[in-house]
Every structure is written in C-alpha cells, then in structure tokens.
Image (cartoon, rainbow, N blue to C red):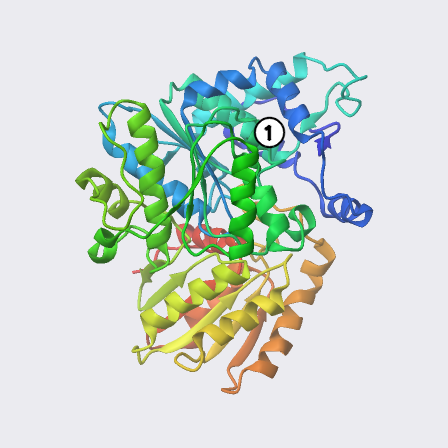
C-alpha cells in the first residue's frame, strides 16, 4: 500500500523519525476496505519495491553483496533468524558486521534493524531514515507505470523499513545479512532479494489467511516464493506433508533444491539461548543456514551435513547458547514474582508456548496468573488452544484480559503505536469482554477473570492480587509483550 501525503518532518531527531514512520502505517479502515474487495495479491508490490529502491539510489542487484540468508515460515522464523545471526557473529574476524532484519519489534522499532545482534543506535536510525525519506521526496516515478506513486507519496510502513534496512546495511558495510520475511514470501517486500546465499523455511501453519490462502498448500506456495535459481533451500523436518510437497514443487520450479534438516543429536545437551524444546528444530535449521554462508565465504572448508549425527563446530554451539531473543519463551524474575513471556499469536505457536509454560511450572506450588491480549486474530480460538495445552497439569487462579494500549493515560509508547486494529473495539473492550465470557465457559476451575484497559493497569493489578510469590504467563500478542517490557523499563522493582 502506498501512503499519500504523509507528514513532512522539519526536524531530524529519532523522535521525528518515529513520528514520520508511524504516519506510514496502514489504518484499520483501509485494511478492512481492502479485505472486502477479496484481493489477496497485490502484483505491483515487487515492481514498486524495485522502483522505490531506484529512487533511493539502488538496483536490486546491489543487495546481492550483502550475502543474504532469507528465512520464511509460519512459526519460528524470527528465532531461526536470531540463531543464525548469533552463529555468524562468532566469526567476527572474517565477518565483522552481520546485519539482521526482523519483525515485529517489541520495545523499539530499532530492534528490526540490528548489526551484530544489537539494534542500531537512535542517532544512526534517524540519520539513515531521513536519507531514505529525503531521497524519496526529491525523486519521482513515471505515473504511466506507477499511477499510485504521486509526488510526495511514500511506501507503507513495512516496505519503508525494508528499504531502510538495505540502505543501512550497505552503508555500514555488512558482510552478511539475515532477513526474516514479513508475511508469506512470494509478494513480500523482502523478496526483492535476487540472489540470496541460502533460503530457509521454518514450520508451516495456518496464518495470515487473507493474504496467503486458506489451506496449507496455498500458504506453502506463498512461502516457497522466496526460492531462487541455484540458491540452496532448507526446511525443518516434520513439515505438514501437503505443505512439504508444494515446497518441493516450488523448489523445482525455481531450479533449486530443498533439503530437510534433522534435529542434531549434539543439541540434546545444549541449553539454547531461546528456551523451549521446539527451538532445537529452529536451531538445527540455523546451523545449516549459517554453514552455507560460512562455506560460501571460504571460512568453513566443508559444509555441515543435514543428518542428525553430523558434528557441530564449537563456535556454532556458543552462538546458539548466547542467542538472546526477548519475548520468546522468556523468563523474568521481578521482585517476588516470576514472569513467563511469549508473544505467541498463532495456533501452533500458542500450543508450543503453553506447553513450555506447563512443563516449566507444573511442579510449582505458587499461584498462577494468565495475562492475555490479542486484538486482530481469533482471540477466543487462541485462548481455547492455550487452555487445552496447559490442562489439567496447570490451572490459573486469575486470568486478565487487556488491550495493547501501553499506559493508563490511554496512550501508546511512541514506538508501539498501532493503527491496524479497530479503535472502537479497543475503547469498548469488545474483545476483552468476549474473552472473559469465553474463559468462564471453558474453565472448570473457576479462575477469577479481570478486564483492564491498558497494560500498565494490568501490571499494577497483578502486583496487588497476592502478597505471596506468583507465576505469571504472558502471551497472545507481541504487542502485549512489547508494551509490558516498556512498562517494566519504567518501573524499578527491588
């Protein structure tokens, strides 16, 4: 989607950049209008990405020098990207700068564009942001070919950030970059990448059906759209069989190979930096993806084999152990309480996260609290998946349903402003009230239900509920997780 007449910023600070960036968000009304047309495919997306790139001074071929790892999938693609980046980061003497582009962000939009695992600074974000912004303002597109690109228009939020990431990584001299697809693959803005070093596909599932299709075959077709000729592609084992068939067909169409990666036996006794038994599959895929980059860069003499018995270099193990990825099976001890945090928001990820929580706390005698938010997907279905996964081993004493608004003032943290949900539904707590009623129906243990208007209020409620220590499970939305971490940053707990 192209945004017309965005804000014209006078200043050049990070705050100015975030304000300008937020003006590029698609609003809820526009999204619903597009959905009502039934048009899933915007065939102009990649043509426009090429044109936007030209206007900021790049051809798509310029991005080939970034030695890119391109990752898609439904569940675990962010974790796999983080694992891959961390492994590559262990070879700093040969690859001094590793870029990482992921979405969404938790606390700050800068998290989407990282170098050597760290978000770029506010100063650099603002610098590169306005270089891209100003180049777009000073250039035009032929309206006969791109009728929506009227003077002053800008690409949408995610497309702009994708352009910004390419510009940043090239200007910073990154030797390899890991790119996580936004949605799907075939028409994702990151698919402007022409010659990645390697492609990876994490576990497939049903999500983003409006854009990708209603069946696992349609979704697999979209995900397989990132495959490129002569670029090896790899995927995790235990893919849905129908999806795997389509992925293999797509690989053949694109004149490349698709290889399944077994979970490496050597990982059985390794404590990964991202918790959860299911992460070993993502870590195994990351090992192979990193191996391809290091081999193509003449750093490894031999590629690592995909069989489960293949030996893993020590630097790879260190990279996996040191991976830090907030909001995914994350445990935080704050004061007397322990928080178990995962931004799961699909059926498969909710089951995985809930199973992790259940297995971790099932022997704990402490009271249990659930803090949940999901504003745009089928929230009741997700809660049902959660309940089935934890029962009967874990029961909740209190269940809190909140919006994704950050503060009691009714405002969002600047980096967390979201225009992609119905503001009326948020203000009237429609989803939260529906969730509370649904929980009362499915929960035989009669947990107390609460509804709060914002994340700050929900946190205060949790702190007041019990004098004794409690275990809190936070899930359903990365918007919730990000907002909660921002609230934590402001509050000091002894």
- Give the residue displayed 19% in from the left and 39% down from the top: 313
Q: Indicate left or right for 96 with 123 as reference.
A: left
Give the image location of residue 340, x and y in percent.
38, 63
Q: Let me know if residue 461 appears in the view.
A: no
Residue hosting label 1:
160
- Looking at the picture, does residue 380 appear above or below residue 23? below
- Give the residue displayed 58% in from the left and 49% down from the top: 412
Circle 1 sits in a helix, a strand or a loop, which is it?
helix
- Give the residue displayed 25% in from the left and 47% down from the top: 321
Which corner quadrant holds the N terminus?
A: top right
- Looking at the picture, does residue 41 appear above or below residue 273? above
Q: Indicate left or right for 274 with 255 as reference.
A: left
Give the image location of residue 124, x and y in percent.
44, 24
Give the image location of residue 287, x and y in percent.
31, 41
Q: Indicate left or right for 294 with 163 as reference.
A: left
Give the image location of residue 202, x and y in percent.
45, 48
- Nearer-the-camera pick, 241 or 177: 241
User: Which image quarter: residue 223?
Assistant: top right
User: Which image quarter: residue 414?
Assistant: top right
Which corner quadrant holds the C terminus?
A: bottom left
- Looking at the picture, does residue 461 appear above or below residue 208? below
Q: Indicate left or right for 242 with 430 as reference.
A: left
Dot 1, how many residues are within 10 Å of its Cα: few (below 14), some (14-19), or many (20+)? many
Q: Residue furthest left?
A: 314
- Looking at the picture, does residue 327 appear above or below residue 311? below
């Amino acid at each position: 989607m192209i945004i017309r007449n965005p804000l014209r910023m006078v200043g050049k600070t990070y705050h100015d950049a975030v304000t300008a960036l937020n003006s590029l968000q698609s609003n809820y009304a526009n999204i619903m209008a597009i959905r009502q047309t039934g048009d899933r495919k915007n065939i102009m997306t990649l043509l426009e990405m090429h044109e936007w790139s030209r206007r900021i001074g790049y051809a798509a071929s310029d991005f080939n020098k970034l030695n890119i790892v391109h990752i898609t999938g439904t569940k675990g693609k962010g974790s796999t990207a983080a694992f891959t980046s961390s492994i590559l980061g262990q070879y700093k003497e040969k690859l001094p700068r590793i870029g990482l582009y992921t979405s969404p962000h938790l606390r700050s939009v800068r998290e989407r564009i990282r170098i050597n695992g760290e978000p770029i600074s506010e100063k650099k974000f603002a610098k590169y942001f306005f270089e891209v912004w100003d180049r777009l303002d000073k250039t035009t597109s032929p309206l006969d070919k791109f009728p929506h690109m009227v003077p002053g228009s800008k690409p949408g939020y995610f497309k702009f950030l994708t352009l910004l990431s390419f510009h940043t990584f090239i200007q910073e001299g990154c030797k390899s970059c890991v790119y996580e697809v936004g949605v799907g693959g075939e028409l994702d803005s990151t698919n402007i990448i022409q010659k990645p070093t390697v492609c990876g596909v994490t576990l497939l599932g049903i999500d983003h059906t409006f854009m990708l299709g209603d069946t696992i075959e349609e979704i697999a077709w979209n995900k397989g759209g990132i495959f490129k000729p002569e670029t090896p592609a790899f995927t995790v084992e235990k893919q849905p069989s129908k999806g795997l068939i389509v992925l293999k067909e797509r690989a053949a169409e694109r004149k490349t190979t698709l290889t399944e990666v077994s979970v490496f036996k050597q990982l059985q006794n390794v404590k990964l930096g991202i918790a959860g038994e299911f992460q070993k599959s993502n870590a195994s895929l990351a090992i192979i993806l990193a191996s391809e980059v290091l081999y193509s860069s003449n750093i490894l003499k031999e590629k690592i084999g995909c069989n489960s018995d293949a030996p893993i270099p020590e630097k790879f193990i260190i990279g996996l152990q040191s991976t830090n990825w907030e909001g995914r099976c994350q445990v935080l001890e704050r004061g007397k309480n322990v928080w178990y945090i995962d931004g799961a928001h699909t059926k498969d990820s909710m089951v995985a996260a809930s199973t992790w929580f259940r297995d971790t706390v099932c022997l704990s005698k402490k009271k249990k609290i659930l803090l949940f938010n999901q504003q745009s997907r089928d929230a009741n279905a997700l809660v049902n998946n959660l309940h089935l996964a934890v029962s009967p081993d874990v029961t909740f004493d209190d269940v809190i349903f909140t919006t994704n608004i950050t503060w009691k003032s009714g405002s969002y943290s600047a980096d967390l402003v979201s225009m992609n949900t119905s503001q009326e539904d948020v203000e009237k707590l429609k989803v939260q009230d529906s969730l509370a009623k649904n929980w009362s129906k499915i929960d035989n243990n009669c947990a107390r239900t609460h509804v709060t208007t914002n994340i700050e209020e929900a946190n205060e409620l949790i702190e007041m509920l019990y004098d004794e220590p409690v275990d809190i499970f936070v899930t359903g939305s990365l918007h919730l997780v990000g907002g909660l971490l921002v609230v934590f940053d402001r509050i000091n707990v002894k």
